[in-house]
Image (cartoon, rainbow, N blue to C red):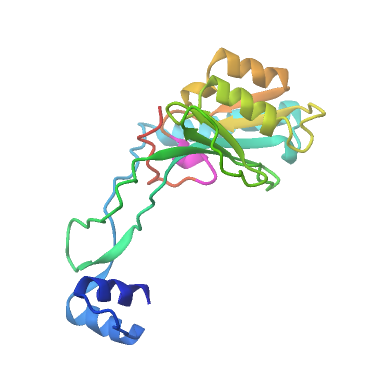
């Protein structure tokens, strides 16, 4: 249905109706197919397999030493999202080396989403960081934490809010049970202030080696674009 509407708009025909079989035959006869826009995969660092093994050994050693329950092992990451998310698929001639996607122009207007989960499968509430100085006037959905930053990404102040409003309120967090938090080498994660926040909550940190976020984060893939991270 979406395909027929696109065809109708492009040809100026308002009452066009076509079945999926008609679309299949039309695309086949005109050499068209569903294509995914071209993109570059993240380049892995040298000896990345050895670094992954060493990271796993470090985490296993921490778990043996402190006996963290699964509910006290967390994984956190920030990911940039845009207000316009163009589809990765479109109709194009077979054999085309470059596949372009038209957008509204807002694909570069971004905000940051902070996601976290526990080893027992529980997902922690998301945190949204908007690129603005004041809080939005719109009603915020229940269970979503909103923070504002002039550049729209995480910093030390944002980490303090995340620790106090989300990590501290996880199951067992108020009791300050020993815990393990895994995240990458993003600048705000490595400051002395952030490390002190973690220590005050009896939280041990395991920092993912540079360039290996796509291999060691549970919700990312090797093609994840992290070029907008600072």
Say which quarter of the image contains residue 211: top left
Q: Is residue 41 left or right of residue 205?
A: left
Q: Is residue 54 above or below residue 89?
A: above
Q: Quadrant of the C terminus?
A: top left
- Give the percent coordinates (x, y) of residue 196: 64, 15
Check the image and name the residue furthest to the front. 137
Q: Is residue 221 left or right of residue 139?
A: left
Q: Is residue 103 above or below residue 211?
A: below
Nearest the viewer among 53 and 162 is 162
Say which quarter of the image contains residue 22: bottom left
Q: Quadrant of the N terminus?
A: bottom left
- Give the percent coordinates (x, y) of residue 75: 60, 37
**Is 80 within the magenta?**
no
Check the image and name the residue furthest to the top. 192
Number of numbered discs on residues: 0
Q: For the point 56% across and 43% down, which residue is it? A: 138
Nearest the viewer among 209 and 151 is 151
- Give the percent coordinates (x, y) of residue 110: 41, 39
Q: For the point 73% across and 26% down, which residue is it? A: 65
Q: For the point 39% across and 32% down, which residue is it? A: 47
Magenta segment, which residues?
212-219
- Give the percent coordinates (x, y) of residue 62: 67, 27
Q: For the point 68% across and 31% down, which residue is it? A: 165
């Amino acid at each position: 249905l979406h395909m027929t509407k696109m065809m109708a708009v492009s040809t100026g025909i308002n009452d066009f109706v076509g079945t999926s079989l008609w679309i299949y035959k039309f695309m086949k006869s005109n050499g068209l197919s569903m294509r995914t826009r071209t993109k570059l995969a993240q380049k892995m660092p040298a000896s990345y397999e050895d670094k992954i093994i060493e990271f796993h050994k470090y985490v296993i050693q921490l778990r043996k030493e402190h006996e963290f329950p699964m509910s006290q092992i967390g994984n956190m990451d920030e990911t940039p999202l845009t207000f316009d998310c163009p589809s990765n698929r479109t109709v194009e001639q077979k054999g085309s080396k470059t596949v372009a996607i038209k957008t509204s122009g807002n694909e570069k207007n971004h905000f940051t989403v902070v996601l976290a989960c526990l080893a027992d499968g529980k997902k922690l509430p998301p945190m949204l960081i908007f690129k603005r100085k004041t809080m939005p006037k719109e009603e915020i959905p229940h269970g979503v934490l909103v923070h504002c930053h002039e550049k729209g990404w995480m910093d030390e102040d944002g980490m303090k809010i995340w620790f106090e409003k989300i990590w501290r309120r996880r199951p067992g967090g108020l009791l300050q049970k020993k815990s393990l938090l895994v995240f990458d080498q993003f600048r705000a994660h490595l400051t002395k202030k952030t490390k002190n926040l973690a220590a005050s909550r009896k939280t041990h940190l395991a920092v993912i080696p540079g360039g290996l976020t796509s291999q060691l984060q549970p919700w990312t893939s090797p093609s994840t674009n992290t070029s907008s991270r600072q």
